Image (cartoon, grey):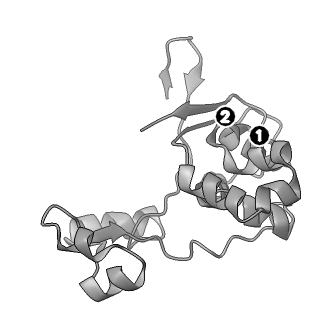
Amino acid sequence: MSKNLTGFEIAVIGMYGRFPGANTINEFWHNLQNGVESITFFSDKELEESGIDSELIKNPNYVKAGGILQNKDSFDAPFFDYTPREAEIMDPQVRIFHECIWGALEDAGYDPKQYNGLIGLYAGASPHFYWEALSTLTGKVNDYGVFAAQQFIDKDFLTTQISYKLNLKGPSVTLYTA
């Protein structure tokens, strides 16, 4: 435990993470210890089939690799008290973060519905312009309502939305990160 600048004690008692090639912190640590490559390398054919321009693929500075998260489309909307429509609109980084927060709470042995103390949530997030544009262009946002949809696609609602859904009563802070 350590004191922060405000004098309050802070303790990290639960952790959870999902990474390319590792669904848990223990798997991630195993990969680090054993030199496991967790980045996926793509062939020119795979890139072309995904819609990448062939001229870009030929560019020697173009990196033909990326980190791929497993099970990124397996969000259990009812478990987190969302409708299927809300989950469809929701930014994928928000869906995954919900799962990670729940995993950290489980790791800590805390049930936020039963715990009376303060559990804070701090997160860094970047805007997901592609997801916002896709949601708008496909009509998902307009069908649901622009204001309501913003709560699911805008990174500014990340921690407050999850704190509300999981009954977390401590500070809830989202930082804009690059």
Residue 31 in picture, x, y percent from top left = 29, 70
40 or 36, which lies in front?
Answer: 40
Farthest residue to the bottom: give it.
45
- Amino acid bearing label 2: Gly
Crowdedness near tag 2: few (<14), some (14–19) or many (≥20) residues, C-alpha within 10 Å: some
Q: Note whether 68 is above or below 178 in the view shown.
A: below
172 or 174, which lies in front?
Answer: 174
Residue 66 in picture, x, y percent from top left = 33, 68
Residue 69 in picture, x, y percent from top left = 47, 70
Q: Are marks 2 and 1 in contact (CB under 8 Å)?
A: yes
157 or 21, which lies in front?
Answer: 157
Q: Note whether 144 is above or below 44 in the view shown.
A: above
First of labels 2, 1 by sequence position: 2
Q: Note whether 78 is above or below 109 in the view shown.
A: below
- Among the 4 quarters of the image, the one containing residue 81: bottom right
> Residue at 79% of width from left, 50% of height from top?
149
- Among the 4 quarters of the image, the one containing residue 167: top right
- Amino acid bearing label 1: Leu
Q: Which mark is residue 120?
A: 2
Q: Is residue 56 left or right of residue 5?
A: left
Q: Marks 2/1: CA distance? A: 7 Å
Crowdedness near tag 1: few (<14), some (14–19) or many (≥20) residues, C-alpha within 10 Å: many
Residue 103 in picture, x, y percent from top left = 62, 59
Residue 43 visible in the picture: no
Element at label 1: loop
